[in-house]
Image (cartoon, rainbow, N blue to C red):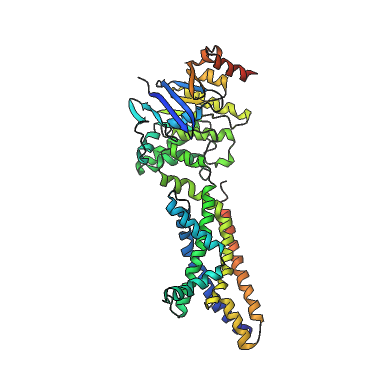
């Protein structure tokens, strides 16, 4: 039984990791775009972007999943996601990407704004272009400062993926829970915790390594 | 002909007139020290010369070429960037780039626009400058591994690496512990001996007197008195200059 459960949970965990990895791949760069939007000098860009960030950060991710999955069907009369497993997965991915991009954007903004203005001015008086200043001087300092908060969000994401099951996206909790019905046992559900723990442990090590790599300067 | 001609420079922030018409000339190889109390506009003047701020009125001419005219200011980023290269600026807070070593700080900007054949030359020049600053043992150290005085000397080498026509200092020793100011003042003094054209905003009166050819006393956005540095600081003509200087010695 233990073997069967482990196999099933591993399979579910694959779904978890897929959602986790794809969310990061899209939301990390999208977050930078949202960040530039929220810092834009043009009010017509800045305020709508900040409004969206407020909505996304101000409502539960579970609710966002439901709205994104069922919303188009209810409000537009078209179920853009279809009813297949892939369709539900993509809907979940979209919700996660939007949600995490907004959180990341605020972390980026904090990081960029924490760099002293003297760093920009030193670049300017050395005749560097705006782009050179950002990429050669500012960016690495920002990365160093945002690694701890980003690692926090990434570890939260590992566990947040379990919310996807409200729209029936298969992931590890879903598979664990299935054993209650099929075999009348609850321990597989508790056992899922071990998978999360091991994975977030690995991520903690990874981020620790990155922090250490960047500790050569202050 | 003067290497730098500044005419009637004015700058306002919100409703406060910070510079009320500054004019002066600087000859090639000359050193000008600018003294005055905080808020007199000294730093703003340097920032306008380095185009970190754009003056509202007035002109800035370097080697006969007018770089700036308040009536039709250059705002194009690329032109601004080229204009800035005529000036170097050493900041009060050093502003070294923390992720680069001392040598990398000095060579970063020159290397950006260099082709591969010039690279070795630029790195050699960077080493020579750091050596000249007494930092030959410190080239591979990161800023946080250096003392304030060492950091400021790296910053001076960094500004020199771009061979500016005029090197500006904004209170270069104000952020330093007293025992570290000497080493920075010494390298500036050496630069003066080598006929580097400099504008030095400073609160170190004896330094302003001994190193500069000309001293300018600024108060309330205006030049109150200008003259040979020794005369101005030892025998000021204007009452306000006297007040300022006697206030310091108390």
Q: Between residues B87 and B211, which one lies in front from this camera angle?
A: B87
Q: Position of residue B14 (x, y in %)?
A: 48, 35
* Residue A28, percent from left and from top: 49, 60
In the image, farthest residue toward the bottom: A183
Report the front residue among A68 and A4.
A68
Q: Is residue A148 visible?
A: yes
Instruction: Give the quadrant of the N terminus of chain B.
Output: top left
Q: Residue at x 34, y 33 (%)?
A: B72
Q: Is residue A175 above or below residue A30?
A: below
Front position in the image: B155 or B3: B3
Residue A18 seen: no
Decide: is B157 above or below A86.
above
**In the rendered view, does A89 fall on the left or right side of A186?**
left
Question: Residue B176's quadrant in the figure?
Answer: top right
Q: Position of residue A34 (x, y in %)?
A: 47, 57
Image position, residue A52 (x, y; %): 49, 60
């Amino acid at each position: 039984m233990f073997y069967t459960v482990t196999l099933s949970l591993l399979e579910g965990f694959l779904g978890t990791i897929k959602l986790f990895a794809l969310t990061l791949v899209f939301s990390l760069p999208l977050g930078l775009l949202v960040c530039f939007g929220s810092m834009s000098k043009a009010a017509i860009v800045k305020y709508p972007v900040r409004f969206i960030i407020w909505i996304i950060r101000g409502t539960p991710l579970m609710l966002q999943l439901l709205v994104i999955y069922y919303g188009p069907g209810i409000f537009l009369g078209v179920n853009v996601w279809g009813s297949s497993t892939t369709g539900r997965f993509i809907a979940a991915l979209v919700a996660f990407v939007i949600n995490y991009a907004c959180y990341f954007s605020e972390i980026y903004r904090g990081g960029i704004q924490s760099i002293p203005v003297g760093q920009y001015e030193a670049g300017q008086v050395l005749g560097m272009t705006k782009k050179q200043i950002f990429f050669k001087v500012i960016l690495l300092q920002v990365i160093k400062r945002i690694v701890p908060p980003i690692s926090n969000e990434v570890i939260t994401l590992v566990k947040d993926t379990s919310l996807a099951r409200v729209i029936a996206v298969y992931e590890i909790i879903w598979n664990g829970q299935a054993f209650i019905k099929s075999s009348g046992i609850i321990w597989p559900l508790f056992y899922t915790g071990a998978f999360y723990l091991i994975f977030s442990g690995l991520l903690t090590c990874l981020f620790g390594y990155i922090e250490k790599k960047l500790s050569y300067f202050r | 002909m003067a290497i730098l001609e500044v005419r009637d420079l004015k700058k306002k922030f919100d409703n406060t007139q910070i510079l009320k018409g500054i004019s002066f000339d600087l000859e090639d190889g000359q050193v000008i020290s600018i003294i005055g109390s905080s808020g007199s506009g000294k730093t703003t003047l340097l920032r306008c010369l380095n185009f970190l701020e754009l003056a509202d009125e007035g002109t800035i001419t370097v080697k006969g070429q007018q770089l700036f005219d308040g009536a039709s200011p250059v705002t194009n980023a690329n032109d601004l960037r080229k204009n800035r290269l005529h000036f170097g600026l050493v900041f009060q807070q050093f502003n070294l780039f923390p992720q680069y070593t001392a040598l990398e700080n000095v060579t970063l900007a020159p290397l950006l626009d260099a082709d591969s054949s010039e690279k070795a030359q630029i790195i050699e020049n960077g080493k020579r400058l750091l050596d000249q600053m007494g930092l030959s043992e410190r080239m591979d150290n990161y800023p946080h591994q250096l003392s304030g005085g060492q950091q400021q000397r790296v910053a001076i080498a960094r500004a020199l690496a771009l061979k500016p026509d005029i090197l500006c200092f904004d209170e270069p020793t104000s952020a330093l512990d007293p025992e570290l100011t000497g080493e920075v003042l010494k390298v500036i003094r050496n630069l003066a001996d080598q006929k580097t054209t400099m504008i030095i905003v400073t609160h170190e009166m004896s330094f302003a007197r001994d190193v500069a050819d000309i001293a300018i006393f600024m108060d309330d956005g205006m030049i109150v008195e200008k003259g040979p540095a020794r005369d101005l600081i030892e025998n000021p003509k204007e009452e306000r200059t006297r007040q300022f200087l006697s206030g310091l010695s108390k």
